[in-house]
Image (cartoon, helix red, strand yellow):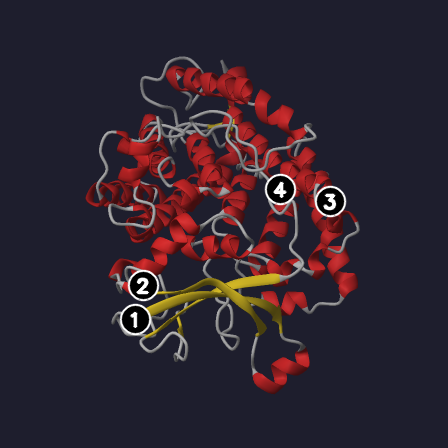
Amino acid sequence: MDWFAGWFGSADFGVARFVLQRGIAAIFVLAFVSGALQFPALLGEHGLLPVPRYLARVARPPGPTLFRWRYSDRLLRAVAWTGAALGLTVVAGLPQRGPAWVPMLVFASMWLLYMSIVNVGQVFYGFGWEILLLEAGFLAAFLGSDQTTTPAITLFAFRWLVFRLEFGAGLIKMRGDPVWRDLTALYYHHETQPMPNPLSWWFHHLPKPLHKVEVLGNHVAQLVVPFFLFAPQPVATVAAAVIIATQCWLVLSGNFAWLNAVTIVAAFSAVAIPAAPGATPAAVPGAAPGGPGTPGWFAVVVLAMGALMVVLSWWPLRNLFSRNQVMNGSFNRWRLANAYGAFGSITRERYEVVVEGTTGDPGSGPWLEYGFRGKPGEPGRMPRQFAPYHLRLDWLMWFLALGSPGLNWFVPFLNKLLDADRASLRLLRRDPFGGQRPDWVRARVFRYRYSTWREWRATGDWWVREPLGDFVPPISRGG
């Protein structure tokens, strides 16, 4: 059965499995910690969009969830910290030392636990990287352990994931905003992206011809290179390296939660490092025929997973060639074989909603500004680096400024500020009232732009902002 072992897996992908398992597990840890620290304030029993109220309103959640029958903040935290602990064991390499069913069970548990959170997370969990992490976590369950070869079918499924992610993003850009087609998208993107990082200002001020080169390089990386992930080695490894380098460039220029991190890790599925001559995987005691290090049951399970993904892939494949291409959507309740994409349109101007409070008369103030952790606020504050950690409130504030519906959670947020709610205030960087209740709060809209080189040298400000008017006029408790 040596031919089967050679077909089923290869020792050349030991490094790929190492990176995939530990990398995806580490991102799961971040996601679970984010849930434990942010979910109760946003969606908990007394949150902005309480899960119990949501579950009472919907016929059924969009997918399976442990909270379908009962939700409590204590149970949420137990789920989140359990998931984080499981992820840490994989990062440490503990489950991988056992039979293949051990890491399979750990990854399946993380997948189900995180899916339980996502499926009741409503708008705060409506991001493409949530379903991306779920799909990657599911596939990682079929990578085997140190006692088995790395299954080629699982690696192919990961490459198909990266292909959909990159090629889908490339198509949505070309079908969407004309600035992607005339190569001018980066004239605006670094300034108007959801959450700039410390280098975004510098990227924005690069020469415009270089911005066009960046966009052209992006098109090559997303529309051409992904096809070579399925080519023979070493071409597939080179394609993966190009994708990884492109994603690292995006990491340097912005905060996109764990979108780039998952893409980088998943791209390692195409990276082959030849094993030392004569090296073979360790045989599994009692394994059924299927080649050294390949138990028969494991081969059957991986083949079944591959068949499932082939069937489920019909919908995202059809979506790629549809004029009405869906961006970041699931076609089944299990969040597998999803459609991906990002920045199909680019905003030309940046708007920000600034939240203020006062203990004085609303007509005269003084009005003091609440400080958010990641989103732009005070002009003199340099943007910070938070990715791959995800600041959910800050991201929703960006969508709010674009005109996306959000008053169902934003007005409750203002009421939490009026009550000086501690859980809500912990989501912020600065409370100007030191934990005391303001008498009034309001939200105003500003137009933001990056300062020029001359303005930055003169004032040290990273932003220049212009007030445009009230978003929510002054309100008081009970008002």
Q: Nearest to the eye among marks 4 and 1: give it.
A: 1
Q: Considering depth in this image, is 56 or 382 the residue closer to the camera?
A: 56
Which comes sooner in the sequence, label 3 or label 2? 3
User: Which of disc 4 and disc 2 is earlier in sequence?
Assistant: 4
**Residue placed most toward the observer, 64 or 358:** 358
Q: Which residue is mark 3?
A: 220
Amino acid at the residue labelled 1: Pro
Q: Is residue 250 above or below residue 99?
A: below
Q: Secondary structure at mark 4?
A: helix
Circle nearer the N terminus (4, 1)? 4
Q: CA distance from mark 2 to mark 1?
A: 8 Å
Residue 236 vs 370, above or below: the answer is: above
Q: Where is mark 2, residue-wise?
A: 417
Q: Which percent across, then down, holds residue 437?
A: 26, 69
- The residue depicted at 33 percent of the width and 43 percent of the height is 87
> Can residue 445 be seen in this snapshot?
no
Query: What element does badge 2 sit on?
Result: helix
Type of amino acid under label 4: Ala
Q: Secondary structure at mark 1?
A: loop
Could you tell me if the residues under marks 3 and 2 are in contact, i.e. CB atoms within 8 Å?
A: no
Disc 4 target residue: 240
- Distance from disc 3 to disc 4, alpha carbons, whole Å, reads 13 Å
**Which is more foreground, mark 3 or mark 2?**
2
Q: Earlier in the sequence, mark 1 or mark 3?
A: 3
Question: For numbered disc 3, what is the local secondary structure?
Answer: helix
- Amino acid residing under circle 2: Leu
Residue ID for mark 1: 438
When the figure is inspected, residue 327 is found, relative to residue 209, above or below; the finding is above
Q: Residue at x 36, y 30 (%)?
A: 61
Amino acid type, residue under disc 3 in the picture: Val
